[in-house]
Image: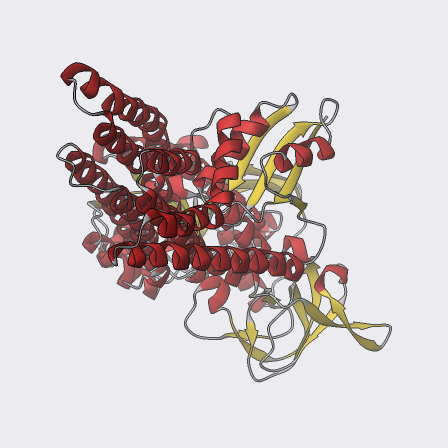
Amino acid sequence: MEKTLSLKIPEMDCPEESQLLKKTLTGLKGVNRLDTFLLSKELRVDYDERLLSKDDIIKAVEETGMSATMTDVGTPAVRKEELERGKKRQLIFTSLSGLLAVSGLLLSLKGLPGDVTIPLYLGAMLIGGLRIALKGLRAARALDLDMNFLMTVAVIGAAAIGEWGEGAMVIFLFSLAQLLESYSLDRARNALRSLMDLSPQEALVRRDGRETILPVEEVRLGDTVVVRPSERVPLDGVVTDGYSHVNQAPITGESTPVKKYVGQEVFAGTINKEGALEFRVTHIAKDTTLAHIVHRVEECQSQRAPFQSFVERFARVYTPAVIALAFLVAIVPPLLTDSAFIPWIYKGLVLLVISCPCALVIATPVSLLSGITCAARNGVLIKGGVHLEEAGRIKAIAFDKTGTLTKGAPEVVDVLPLSTNSLSHDRFLGIAAAIELRSEHHLGGAILRRAREDGIEPLEATGFQAIPGKGASALVEGRKYYIGNTKLFRDFLGIPISPVEATLSGLQTQGKTVMLVGGADGLLGIITVADDIRRSGVEALPKLKHNGIEKILMLTGDNGGTAKTIASRLAVDEYFAELSPEDKVTAVRECIKRYGKTAMVGDGVNDAPAMAAATLGIAMGTVGTDTALETADIALMSDDLSKLPFALALSRRTLRVIKENIAFALIIKAVFLTLIIPGWTTLWMAVGADMGASLLVIFNGLRLLRYNP
């Protein structure tokens, strides 16, 4: 039976520890899958509990010299305190190592003999290097020659050939660089933690007429929660009393507060403004919209984006190759040229130090997580690095019309019984409403609303049947009636529509969606519905062109006339009308053939097949919608299409930063490898260059957290 174990690993600070854990645990019988989350310091293991226990996994982790705590044990504050203690220890040891190394160097410059300086250098090596040496030995035992092992060999080698000063400076600089790298990565971790901290840890709950403050984990479904002015909403729910405006920017990125009154949804992490609200809890703490967002952002660390996979494959070949080269540099030239061994051994040690691909390995995940966290802060949920990369390469975007480019709240405009029938307005609308009573289609809802406004009760109907892409039918008072588009009557039922074609054409050119109502023996009348265009769409679509999108398309099941009118008011290059869900899939695949990588933007549920067929599926208006959060590659939490240009611009910027980081890391390696041969690179210069490159790519990636186009 498969189980999942999540562990916090406080000592997992860099790719070396992550790689060591993978090598150690994948060798255990019963481990089915293993993911390390470097930035959240978490290890997740899927294992067969018949072959392996939790204790076995924790023991294997501890054998690497790292500690493991189950994520559901202890409080976050305790874990953070332990982490801070470890950092303080490392800071003290690094400072002492630096003090001894610099003291030895200064005394050496003053001409004091080795009897005075070597003990200082040795002290610097032991204090600063013991932790590094232990890590390196554990890695070597797992057949993983990581940076800690290479640095240990380099320092011992430097001491063996009499370069005590360089060995001491190398260990100090390396220890300092590791400390700085850890603090730098903490910035990315804090950005992720800030998402978690959006939601309060306590809630004011009313039970049995009494108000009690409880931890959010103890609040049950159906409980009534009270939120005072200026407080954050602790859980998802539906307002049962009160009126206020709520700032939903932390979840949806919306710039203006949203009205909340009885029946409206509220979401954990949002901020109540001036009024008090009471709401009924609809999602417990672990299932809120915010919890889903945080989970998705955390999960993205385990997904290997194309750039990341390439770099890791490259590193697996590059590191052993350079280690072998270092050995050859130290041994072969002296043997062939009969020259002294010491200078060549020194060059081999420098090559060892410069060989570790730290900067390369860490460049991509830091940039991707920073980009994804920035997107989440702005109401855009990107489901992993692979999707962030894909968004940066999109050439065409296809939009669903209803509910995406339009508001999705259509209203009936015209109710037109045919003069050839003796049906009254009320009777005609009553038949249409009777068919739509069981329908889930948004146009059916518009007809029912209009019937209620006119005081008309839907007639009795049975045998409702949806006809996908065309309409619906039902038995009304024992007789079968149909409602739908022209395809339904002309192609499916074989009923001629030529008597009303001129009328239909005129209505469609006004941007109205036309529905026909009739029976098996002919048409009864026409109902038109109109849906306003989203203002955000008018502003957003031209910006997409500025962000490198070559083609913008609109896909709709609506008639050609309405589609043409909507398209003319937007920056749409092409439109396809009267499409069934299957037709939309075909249209998306055709777009991919013609234009390359194509995104499909829809509501995340109705357009799921087309979104799945696209290179990238983008769902909009998904706040509170679990299904859409699960199905889309990218989710716009609000109905604001202006978030789409932001998401694409951010993804392109992230790709650029990753390329910059990889190029920078490779150039640094190439320069210092070249400078080794003439002997212009020293050990301490090599470690400074290697760890300096790691810090620079981290800082470059972290800049994405503040990205604002």
**What is the x, y in percent for residue 245?**
54, 78
Horizontal relation, residue 625 to residue 403: left or right: right
Compared with 466, 645 (above or below) is: below
Q: Residue 427: x, y in percent?
A: 57, 57
For the point 54% across and 36% down, which residue is it?
35
The answer to which quarter of the image holds residue 304 is top left
Work out whether residue 198 or residue 702 is closer to the camera in this orientation and state it.
702
Rendered location of residue 644, percent (x, y): 34, 55
Q: Residue furthest bottom?
A: 274
Please identify the residue farthest to the right as the structure is shown: 208
Above-or-below relation of 187 to 25: below
Tell me the colour scheme of the image: secondary structure
Identify the residue at image location x=21%, y=42%: 668
Determine if residue 170 is in view.
yes
| Image-quadrant location for residue 149 | top left
Residue nearer the viewer, 661 or 527: 661
The quarter of the image holding the C terminus is bottom left
Quadrant where the N terminus is found in the figure: top right
Number of marks in the image?
0
Does residue 155 appear left or right of residue 5 in this picture?
left
Q: Is residue 591 left or right of residue 616?
A: left
Q: Residue furthest top?
A: 336
Is residue 598 positioned above or below 640 on the image?
above
